């Protein structure tokens, strides 16, 4: 199961074990069970503190428990093989069960240990899902830290009958005590916020106690991270308030156009940026959602950013880098069938539509790339473009047209997504040239029609926005409000690309530096100090 390189890496990691670990498998006579036995035997052979046994009696076969030998009440179960994107999750489960301390905020760990009640999690993942590991690892940690929490992590391809019975049509899909809990990516702090009724109040109290920043960046994507690195290196007290650090990077798989980096993946790049943030003197406040901007009354004064948990942060200079999100179609049925056939991430959810008929809506690069990827998994793809022609790069169009299980529709307007028994069963398509309508029977719709800037919270701030809701900036990233700058996909800068966002973020950081050294602090800052 493991090649020589993986064995060598795993051997190195297992050297960090402090206590014996037990792997207890429940197996059947099928091929996946044989592979599971082989995997566990290989892992056990790499370190004398790991013991594998095959006398488990769980109904899910194949599956196996990872637990500390001295504390069998704390365990996590993998059902199916945690390979692909989940191999790292398997390694971390082994290390944490073996007493290696997790790199997690101490306050979060104490919050996990202090949870009262019985929490039995079941979570479905796919091996190609780059959002799933965060949820898998968070639930694993919780189960290994609190004996009243269990986590069963299920590879959907192995348990297709369960996936169908529970109407799982998007991953990560998490159930708590047998009931749907959440569909989508969650980090540890987000899960705790849903379980701990006092979480928001605790977070607000902690944030409210912070002194004013010299530079506060709102948003934690490539633009925000670049801004923070530049201002911190200039010696300014810098903070990042991010609803989700990494932003859209978490929804981006292959990145091949970042100069100097031949290939990387969004989640890895987000982790690299977070690591770099940690190496600088930057206060990263994750899960901090901004809901209102109150600009400073005088030049050099303090701007205020109000957060959804009730806390407020203040700063002399603000860099707004809240990015953008997937645009919705806005047609009947889209919201109703979201995660029940309507999807936005082909990499995450594509495997759940194996052999089925699906549609991709959007003929730009994202839509055509998604269609090309999905043709390898699904039975048939109908690509629908609103315009008279596709807008993707010619090389992508040529690749798409060469595939046999694709129909390309231009001048097509999706007017409704239909369903039955809680699942998508088709869509209604209008020909914009003739006005004719037809219904296409299918089981999945992937929406890839561009981005919407995250600026709703700025509507009443006095900040100038374009008709599309983008922040208006000048050549230096400045807005119409003194000391407030914009960067990245949230602004009116053309070309929404990672490398562009990084450049614009760096420029905004330098412009913030210029503003601060040329502007005397207002009297209110002296009073606040």
Image: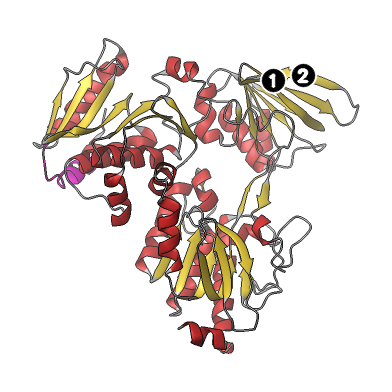
Q: Which quarter of the picture shows residue 407?
A: top right
The quarter of the image holding the C terminus is bottom left
Ranked by sequence position, the earlier of labels 1 and 2 is: 1
Q: Are marks 1 and 2 in contact (CB under 8 Å)?
A: yes
Q: Using residue 80 as the reference point, say whether residue 210 is left or right of it.
A: right
**Can residue 265 be spotted in the picture?**
no
Question: x%, y% of residue 118?
Answer: 31, 33
Give the number of marks.
Answer: 2
Residue bearing mark 2: 439
Crowding at label 1, few (<14), some or many (≥20) Cα neighbours within 10 Å?
Answer: many
**Can residue 479 be spotted in the picture?**
yes
Q: Name the residue located 80 percent from the left edge and 38 percent from the top edge.
A: 387
Question: x%, y% of residue 126?
Answer: 43, 29
Disc number at residue 426? 1
- Alpha-carbon span between mark 1 and mark 2: 7 Å
Relative to the observer, which residue lies in front, 72 or 403? 72
Q: Using residue 247 as the reference point, say whether residue 211 is left or right of it.
A: left
Q: Name the residue located 63 percent from the left edge and 27 percent from the top edge.
A: 337
Q: Is residue 16 magenta?
A: yes
Q: Which quarter of the picture shows residue 135?
A: top left
Relative to the observer, which residue lies in front, 6 or 230? 230
Q: Is residue 53 magenta?
A: no
User: Under tag 2, what secondary structure?
Assistant: strand
Q: Using residue 38 as the reference point, say whether residue 115 is left or right of it.
A: right
Up/down of 242 relative to 83, above or below: below
Q: Name the residue located 67 percent from the left edge and 43 percent from the top edge.
A: 327
User: Under tag 1, what secondary structure?
Assistant: strand
Task: Give the magenta-colored segment's residue range.
Answer: 9-20
Visual colour scheme: secondary structure
The quarter of the image holding the N terminus is top left
Question: x%, y% of residue 249?
Answer: 51, 50
Question: x%, y% of residue 270?
Answer: 45, 53
């Amino acid at each position: 199961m493991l090649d020589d390189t993986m064995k060598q890496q795993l051997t190195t990691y297992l050297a960090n074990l402090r206590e014996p670990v037990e792997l207890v498998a429940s197996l059947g006579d099928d091929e996946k069970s044989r592979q599971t036995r082989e995997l566990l035997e290989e892992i056990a052979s790499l370190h004398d503190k790991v013991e594998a046994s095959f006398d488990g009696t769980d109904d899910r076969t194949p599956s196996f428990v990872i637990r500390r030998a001295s504390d069998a009440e704390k365990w996590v179960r993998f059902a199916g093989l945690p390979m692909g994107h989940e191999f790292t999750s398997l390694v971390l489960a082994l290390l944490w069960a073996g007493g290696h301390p997790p790199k997690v905020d101490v306050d979060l760990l104490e919050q996990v240990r202090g949870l009262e009640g019985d929490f039995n999690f079941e979570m479905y993942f796919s091996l190609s899902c780059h959002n799933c590991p965060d949820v898998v690892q968070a639930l694993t940690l919780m189960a290994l830290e609190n004996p009243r929490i269990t986590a069963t992590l299920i590879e959907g391809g192995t348990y297709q009958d369960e996936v169908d019975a529970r109407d799982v049509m998007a991953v990560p899909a998490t159930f708590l005590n047998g009931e749907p809990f959440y569909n989508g990516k969650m980090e540890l702090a987000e899960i705790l916020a849903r379980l701990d009724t006092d979480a928001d109040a605790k977070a607000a109290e902690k944030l409210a106690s912070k002194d004013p920043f010299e530079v506060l960046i709102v948003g934690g994507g490539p633009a925000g991270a670049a801004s923070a690195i530049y201002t911190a290196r200039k010696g300014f007290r810098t903070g990042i308030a991010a609803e989700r650090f990494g932003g859209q990077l978490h929804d981006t798989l292959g990145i091949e156009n970042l100069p100097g980096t031949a290939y990387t993946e969004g989640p890895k790049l987000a982790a690299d940026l977070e690591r770099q943030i940690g190496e600088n003197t930057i206060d990263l406040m994750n899960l901090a959602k901004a809901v209102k901007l109150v600009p400073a009354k005088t030049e050099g004064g303090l701007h205020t950013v109000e957060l959804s948990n009730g806390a407020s942060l203040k700063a002399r200079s603000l860099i707004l880098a809240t990015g953008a999100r997937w645009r919705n179609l806005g047609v009947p049925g889209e919201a109703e069938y979201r995660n029940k056939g309507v999807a936005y991430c082909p990499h995450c959810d594509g495997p759940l539509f194996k052999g089925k008929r699906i549609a991709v809506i959007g003929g730009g690069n994202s839509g055509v790339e998604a269609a090309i990827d999905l043709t390898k998994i699904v039975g048939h793809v109908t690509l629908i473009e609103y315009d008279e022609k596709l807008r993707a790069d010619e090389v992508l169009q040529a690749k798409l047209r060469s595939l046999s299980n694709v129909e390309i529709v231009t001048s097509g307007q999706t007017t409704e997504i239909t369903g039955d028994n809680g699942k998508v069963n088709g869509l209604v398509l209008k020909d914009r040239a003739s006005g004719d309508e037809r219904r296409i029977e299918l089981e999945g719709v992937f929406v890839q029609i561009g981005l919407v800037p995250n600026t709703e919270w700025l509507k009443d701030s006095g900040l100038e926005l374009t008709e599309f809701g983008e922040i208006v900036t000048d050549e230096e990233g400045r807005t119409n409000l003194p000391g407030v700058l914009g960067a990245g996909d949230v602004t009116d800068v053309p070309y929404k690309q990672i490398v562009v966002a990084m450049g614009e973020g760096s420029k905004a950081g330098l412009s913030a530096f210029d503003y601060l050294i040329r502007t005397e602090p207002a009297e209110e800052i002296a009073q606040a100090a």
